[in-house]
Image (cartoon, rainbow, N blue to C red):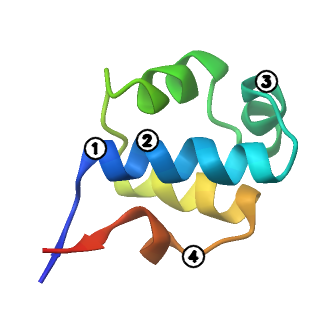
C-alpha cells in the first residue's frame, strides 16, 4: 500500500530541489507552482494535490513515486 506522508514529501521535494541547485523561485518558474506554495509544502503547512505533485516531479526530472512511500 502506498501512503502520502507530508513529512516524506517535504523532505524529498527540498532535497530534489537542492540537488538541482535551485532555489524555490527557480522551481516555481520551472514547474508553474507558486514560490509561496512550494515554501508551504516544504514546511508541511500545505499538502499538494496530485496535479501539483506531477508538475513538481516533471520540473525536477523525477517520478511522482519518489514523493510517496510504502505504508
Badge 2 marks a residue whose secondary structure is helix
- Return the disc, 2 or 4, that comes first in the chain's sequence: 2
Badge 4 marks a residue whose secondary structure is loop
- Return the disc, 4 or 1, that comes first in the chain's sequence: 1
Q: How far across and how far down the image is residue 66, in percent?
A: 48, 71
Residue placed most toward the observer, 51 or 2:
2
As measured in the structure, the alpha-carbon distance from the residue carrying label 4 to the one carrying label 3 is 21 Å
Q: How far across and how far down the image is residue 53, in percent?
A: 48, 55
**Picture quadrant of residue 4:** bottom left
As measured in the structure, the alpha-carbon distance from the residue carrying label 4 to the one carrying label 1 is 17 Å
Q: To which residue does mark 3 refer?
A: 25
Q: To which residue does mark 1 refer?
A: 6
Q: Disc 1 vs disc 2: Cβ atoms closer than 8 Å?
A: yes
Q: Disc 3 vs disc 2: Cβ atoms closer than 8 Å?
A: no
As measured in the structure, the alpha-carbon distance from the residue carrying label 3 to the one carrying label 2 is 16 Å
Q: To which residue does mark 2 refer?
A: 10
- Return the disc, 1 or 3, that comes first in the chain's sequence: 1
As measured in the structure, the alpha-carbon distance from the residue carrying label 1 to the one carrying label 3 is 21 Å
**Between marks 1 and 3 in the image, the one whose residue lies nearer the viewer:** 1
Residue placed most toward the observer, 28 or 19:
19
Residue at 31% of width from left, 20% of height from top? 45
Which residue lies most toward the top here? 36
Q: Disc 1 vs disc 3: Cβ atoms closer than 8 Å?
A: no
Residue at 41% of width from left, 23% of height from top? 43
Q: Classify mark 3: residues with Cα within 10 Å, few (<14), some (14-19) or many (20+).
A: some
The N terminus - image quarter? bottom left
Q: To which residue does mark 4 refer?
A: 63
Which residue lies most toward the bottom here? 1
Above or below for 19 versus 54: above
Amino acid at each position: 500500500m502506498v501512503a502520502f506522508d507530508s513529512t516524506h514529501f517535504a523532505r524529498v521535494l527540498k532535497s530534489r530541489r537542492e540537488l538541482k541547485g535551485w532555489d524555490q523561485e527557480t522551481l516555481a518558474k520551472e514547474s508553474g507552482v507558486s514560490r509561496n506554495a512550494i515554501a508551504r509544502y516544504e514546511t508541511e503547512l500545505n499538502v499538494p494535490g496530485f496535479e501539483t505533485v506531477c508538475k513538481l516531479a516533471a520540473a525536477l526530472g523525477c517520478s511522482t513515486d519518489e514523493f510517496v512511500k510504502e505504508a
